[in-house]
Image: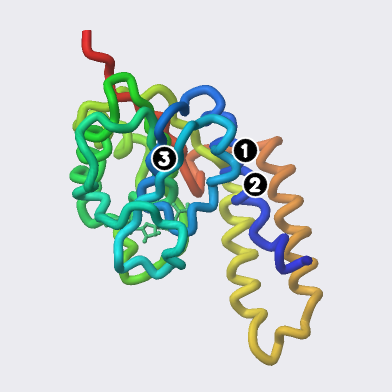
């Protein structure tokens, strides 16, 4: 049970924001670019008619939930065939982010909306396919360059949650193998996350965010 809870803080914050945005912006046919195991299937189901997951053959994740095999750079679907897109925690794994954003723009209908989550301060993961971290200004530049209009961009945490969560991840990393019986580490981890969550509400300095969530619209044709 405690193990289950260990990642709860950042996942919880991410899910809450995604749900809030989904209720406002997502509808119709949704493509989930770099879907992995399609963890947001249930969360997004109330808002869309169809949820298709795209991922590439080389993914390190379980492939059983992928509906379309292909690259984020060359999605095998027609132009303007989706109303909505999500792309969570993928942009940092793409060598050519601009090309992938152009491809998402191509497959969205005019007026269609994409929700991206992108890390700013986070440890290396899924190596060696971990290429970049993004500031708010870099994101505004890239999305604008390919023709998206940014409707909203939110930092999901401040200093306390970011570094509290990284500290806890590192603690759990050490709490493996023969030391695994040391359950007090799990309890300390939960306590730190709880405090970090409260402190972030009191003092949220967005310059230290672990993640941004971006809502981007393909402009309507006039
Ligand atoms: C950190 S995981 C995120 C998975 C999922 N979006 C989520 O939020 O749980 C990154 C995903 O990007 C996928 N990915 C990496 N490079 C890709 C590419 N060129 N085309 C499509 N998917 C890619 C990986 O296979 C992996 O599923």
| SS type, badge 1 | helix
Q: Is mark 3 within 8 Å of ligand 1?
A: yes
Assign ligand 1 to one image quadrant.
bottom left
Could you tell me if the residues under marks 1 and 2 are in contact, i.e. CB atoms within 8 Å?
yes
The residue that appears at 49% across and 31% down in the rendered structure is 48
| Sooner in the amino-acid sequence: mark 1 or mark 3 | 1
Where does label 2 land, which residue? 12
Residue 171's image quarter?
Answer: bottom right
Q: Nearer the viewer, residue 127 or 28?
A: 28
- Whether residue 16 is visible here, answered yes or no, is yes
Query: Around disc 1, counting alpha carbons within 10 Å, would you say few (fewer than 14), some (14 to 19), or many (20 or more)?
Result: few
Q: Position of residue 136 (x, y in %)?
A: 38, 36
Image disc number at residue 86: 3
Q: Is residue 183 above or below residue 138?
A: below
Where does label 1 land, which residue? 16
Image disc number at residue 25: none
**Image quadrant where one finds the C terminus:** top left
Q: How is the image coloured?
A: rainbow
Q: Position of residue 178 (x, y in %)?
A: 69, 92
Looking at the image, residue 173 sits to the left or right of residue 1; the answer is left
**Image quadrant where one finds the N terminus:** bottom right
The residue that appears at 72% across and 60% down in the rendered structure is 5
């Amino acid at each position: 049970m405690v193990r289950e809870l260990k990642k709860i803080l950042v996942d919880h914050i991410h899910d809450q924001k995604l749900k809030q945005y989904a209720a406002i912006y997502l509808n119709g046919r949704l493509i989930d670019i770099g879907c992995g195991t399609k963890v947001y299937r249930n969360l997004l189901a109330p808002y869309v008619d169809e949820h298709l997951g795209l991922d590439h053959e080389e993914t390190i994740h379980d492939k059983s939930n992928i509906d379309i095999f292909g690259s984020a750079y060359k999605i095998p679907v027609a132009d303007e065939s989706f109303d909505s897109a999500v792309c969570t925690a993928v942009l940092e794994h793409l060598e050519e982010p601009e090309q992938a954003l152009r491809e998402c723009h191509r497959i969205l209908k005019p007026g269609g909306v994409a929700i991206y989550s992108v890390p700013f301060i986070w440890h290396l993961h899924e190596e060696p396919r971990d290429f970049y971290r993004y500031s708010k200004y870099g994101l505004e530049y890239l999305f604008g360059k390919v023709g998206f209009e940014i409707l909203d961009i939110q930092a999901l945490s401040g200093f306390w949650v970011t570094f509290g969560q990284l500290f806890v991840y590192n603690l759990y990393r050490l709490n493996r193998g023969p030391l695994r019986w040391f359950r007090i580490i799990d309890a300390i981890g939960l306590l730190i996350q709880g405090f970090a969550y409260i402190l972030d509400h009191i003092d949220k300095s967005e310059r230290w965010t672990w993640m941004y969530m971006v809502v981007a619209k393909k402009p309507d044709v006039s």
